[in-house]
Image (cartoon, rainbow, N blue to C red):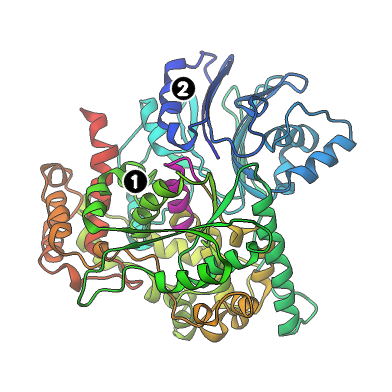
Amino acid sequence: MCGICGELRFDSQLPDPSVIQRMADKLARRGPDHEGVMTDGVLAFGHRRLAIIDLSPNADQPMLDKALNLILVFNGTIYNYKELRAELQEIGYEFFSEGDSEVILKAYHAWGEKCVERFYGMFAFAIWDMRNLTLFLARDRFGIKPLYYSLADSRLRFASSVQALLASGDIDTSLDPVALHYHFTLHAVVPAPRTILNGIRKLAPATSMTFSADGEISQRTWWQLDSTRPKATLSEQDWLAATRAVMKRAVERHRLASDVPVGVLLSGGLDSSLLVGLLADHVDDLLTFSVGFEDLGEGAEKADEFEYSDQVVEKFKTRHHQYRIPNAEVLKRLPEAVANMAEPMVGQDAVAFYLLGERVSKEVKVVLSGQGADEVFGGYFWYPRMNDADGSPVERFSQHYFDRDHAEYLDMISPAWHVPDVTTDLVAGALSQPQADEFLDQVLRFDVTTLVVDDPVKRVDNMTMAWGLEARVPFLDHELVELAAKMPPSLRLKEGGKFPLKAMARGIVPDSVIDRPKGYFPVPALKYVRGDFLDFMRNILNSEACIQRGLYNRHYVDKLLANPEAYFTRIQGSKLWHLALLELWLQTHVDPLHD
């Protein structure tokens, strides 16, 4: 829901309205329903609204509360806003709107920076205190909603996308060598606060920052995930009963916080099928959406999962929309999808979500999606492999997850961007944090609090919001994640992973969907690079811009181009696509700034 941006000056100068307008214009696709700009001395806010809760102008933003002297811009949804509203009314607050945005304003006034601890939902917001001249920024527990910023001596700028910040001008677009190492080692994940560009940073999940008008900054991490066992021993049935109760509550929260219809992105896998099953009895005429792509033939995976999604549709009689997209359209639309990526995203399903989002947005404004279930409940094939491996925690993790070892990275990247093995240091530090009982507790916590943020969750938000479509992720409801984190990892990994969800799904969704092999959102043409797709990537990597940039060692590029299907990462991504995607992203977002 929405795109936000703003500027706070530290030098007593007034923000340039044209800067705010340029940023807001870049966020138009995130919020097609209303545009607003507001200034108060050294502070300026911009907002683009996607109207989902309280569709009236009373909920437009920036939202000014004259009685409290507070101004808000907000992106996201607070699922428990009605309960919080009632609590705030009991202590004397009066409301002029019916939505969740105003609840944030009142909650901040009532409880200060700790208000975020009371919010169930996904959010990135900024509040300007007109009396104290302070700016408060906050982001949700799992970073479901993005918040980027650029900090200079004289000012702070922030926005929902990198593109908006770049449009503001005067941004350092040089490449961050440490972020590059993360990007090429962790499947395009660059953990906060870094991005691939030196001049742009992002607020970490479960973090807030407060800025004064004279440039003083304070930062607070307001939530952490505890992955230790409870003191009381619980039986398997106890865990499964708790999972059912919390999962049903999470889905209901995500469904009810909307004044417009809510659909489901139905992949045909367990996670999205379970969402359909839990919603079917509560939603008349439930809308579901599936996408598939063109098969490549010999050696490549099947390019759709319609045989499973069709079974779910038949069982629950949903109003289904099925789309099959030819490879010619995928190739034609690739540059457009990359233009809408706030950061470079190598996951092939980013393009799938972009093309699906275009079609779904013509039918609904809100959809539920299954992202996060594999990270929360241990569904990926590499978890048991890590668990069975020998060595230190970071060695066990890296040999089954890192896209490249450090030596290969140095062979790929030109010496000007060489750094020590910073990714190994990052992961070792993350895994060694307290409040995790076992190795897999460490891994699953790192995945759900860091990797999921800057890989699948970021892709889904970017690619759906590019069409004014809000994707909600019930499997990242924080109560559900906290419950799962306390389970023994062996319970989550039982029967090939996601055992609590499989047990819950029995009797709800067809057994064939539960017992099928784990599937992925397939776009085979971006994994098995052949024909026109190979020509496309070759042209990018042999372009004058790429050669002049000098980021890649040419012998490494030539090796991948000569035999692209021989070089896959440990989690089965195309190494050639990784190189081509980053270069295309840089040519799209960075190079034109120097014209």
Q: Residue at x 23, y 41 (%)?
A: 587
State the SS at label 1. Answer: loop
Q: Main secondary structure of the magenta part?
A: helix
Query: For residue 101, which numbered disc appears in the image?
Result: none
- What segment carries the magenta color? 456-469
Give, as a three-letter code, the residue at label 1: Asp
Q: Label 2 sits on what residue type?
A: Ile
Compared with 226, 395 (above or below) is below
Looking at the picture, does residue 571 appear above or below residue 75? Answer: below
Residue 224, position in %: x, y?
65, 58
Q: Is residue 438 visible?
A: yes
In the picture, measured across the screen, residue 121 lies left or right of residue 558, that is right
Which residue is at the front of the view, 47 or 555?
Answer: 47
Q: Which residue is the site of mark 2? A: 20
Q: Tell me: residue 117, above or below residue 149.
A: below
Image coords of residue 568 (percent x, y):
26, 70
Tell me if 416 is positioned left or right of 191 in this view: left
Q: Is residue 226 magenta?
A: no
Mark linked to residue 176:
1
Q: Quadrant of the C terminus?
A: top left
Residue 423 percent location from the top left of the image:
40, 61
Number of other residues with Cα within 10 Å of mark 1, as a class: few under 14, some 14 to 19, many 20 or more: some
